[in-house]
Amino acid sequence: MAGMNTTTRILHEGEDRETHFGALNPPIYHASTFTRPTMQAFLEGMAEGSQAYIYSRDSNPTVRALEKKMALLEGAEDAIAAASGMAVITGALLTFLNAGDHVLVVDACYGPTRRFMNMVMARFGVEVTYYHPDLRDLEPLFRPNTRLLYLESPGSHSFHIQDLPALAAQAQRRGILTLADNTWVTPLYQQPHRCGVDIVAHTGTKYINGHADAVVGLLTARRELIQQMRPVFRLMGATLGPAEAYLTLRGLRTLPLRMAQHQAAGLALARWLQAHPKVRRVLHPGLPDFPGHDLARAQMSGWGGLFAFELLPPATPADRHHFLDALQVISMGVSWGGFESLIIPLLARDEATAAQHRRVGLTDDCYRLSAGLEAVEDLIADLEHALDQYSVVSIQ
């Protein structure tokens, strides 16, 4: 299928229909154990590096079909599917970082990633340094013991754009592995491997699944790196169930259609908010005046539907509640990337988070909005109604 359109390849590659009696959809293999017909076959299946199905904590045919499709999408040699986005991120970190190592982490990374770095990696003797997402020259921050560079572009909440090719090249010259979270834009619109990144992680719960009914993590890399990581994932027990893999395979089939709608809705809402008198600024990489827009266009071919906006300061703290409580179509929820539109306030709940928000330019009047698949005019009407309930100190 080489040379075919990605949309076509998503539908067909990795299906292995002959093995599944011609079933259009790969079946859900609800089996914990797979038997072998002879002792020789059993020994071969148990050998290191074997692709045989033995036990679903190690591998499962439904899960494997998903892994093949993700490797295709990201332009990688192989993939690992696991129980959550944090499972694939932590599994990769635990594989390649040891006590005494140093890791550079972008300051706009996903919140749970930061907490894992601070709570677990630091406790295990790994030194963690956070760097500003605007930095394009990390040479002064590299140390002799730097083993991994952690990237995320666009960054969580602030949507900073990182120069992936430049940063990956700097790390590569020093033999430092790079890991990028590519959840926001999906491999349809950005492929970090083509920018020189070694390992790419996704919270497949978001756009890849797209239906808000499965939690899944996905990771792609060169085959040699995948082979190093698989034993760690097996021992962690971060197994993706076959039912979740099946749901995610179903979601993948409509990914190009859904992403086109998320992109269009997100841009329409961002532009509408940008023109509203109670909105101070909108943080969406697709807007021409967004810092990093030109860099984003250079390394991405499209946009996600997730972005942030900052309101003018409220007349009273209660006005933040009035705004969110007035929404009727857009729901408050911590995830995103599904069919439903979601919003959360980016209030800093502790001083450490407040300090990190200040470093990347966020305030307590910022909100994160995920544009779902509802009619755009209904989403705009919902925001307009909610903003009518929001009083500001002054309209500038």
Image (tube, rainbow, N blue to C red):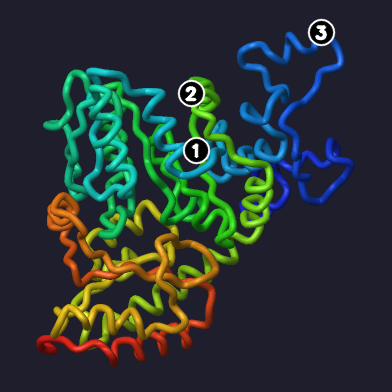
Residue name at image x 18 percent, y 42 percent = 131
Residue of label 3: 39
The N terminus sits in image quarter: top right
Looking at the rendered structure, which numbered label has been put on residue 290? none
Residue name at image x 89 percent, y 41 percent = 21
* Cα separation between marks 3 and 2: 27 Å
* Cα separation between marks 3 and 1: 33 Å
Return the residue nearer the eye: 378 or 214: 214
Q: Give x and y (percent) for residue 145.
A: 21, 19
Between discs 1 and 2, the one toward the N terminus: 1
In the displayed structure image, the side of residue 75 where residue 302 appears, left or right = left
* Cα separation between marks 1 and 2: 13 Å
Q: Relative to 130, does residue 145 appear above or below in the rendering? A: above
Residue name at image x 59 percent, y 58 percent = 213
Return the residue nearer the eye: 238 or 60: 238
In the displayed structure image, the side of residue 339 where residue 331 appears, left or right = left
Residue name at image x 37 percent, y 41 percent = 180
Q: Relative to 340, does residue 293 appear above or below in the rendering? A: above
Residues packed near mark 3 inside 10 Å, few (<14), some (14 to 19) or many (20 plus):
few
Between tags 1 and 2, which lies in front? 2
Q: Give x and y (percent) for residue 329.
A: 47, 81
In the displayed structure image, the side of residue 135 where residue 248 appears, left or right = right
Q: Are marks 3 and 2 in contact (CB under 8 Å)?
A: no
Question: Could you tell me the amino acid type at mark 2?
Answer: Val
Residue of label 1: 219
Residue of label 2: 232
- In what element is the residue under mark 2? helix
Q: Relative to 143, does residue 384 appear above or below in the rendering? A: below
Q: Give x and y (percent) for residue 240.
A: 59, 39
Between discs 3 and 2, the one toward the N terminus: 3
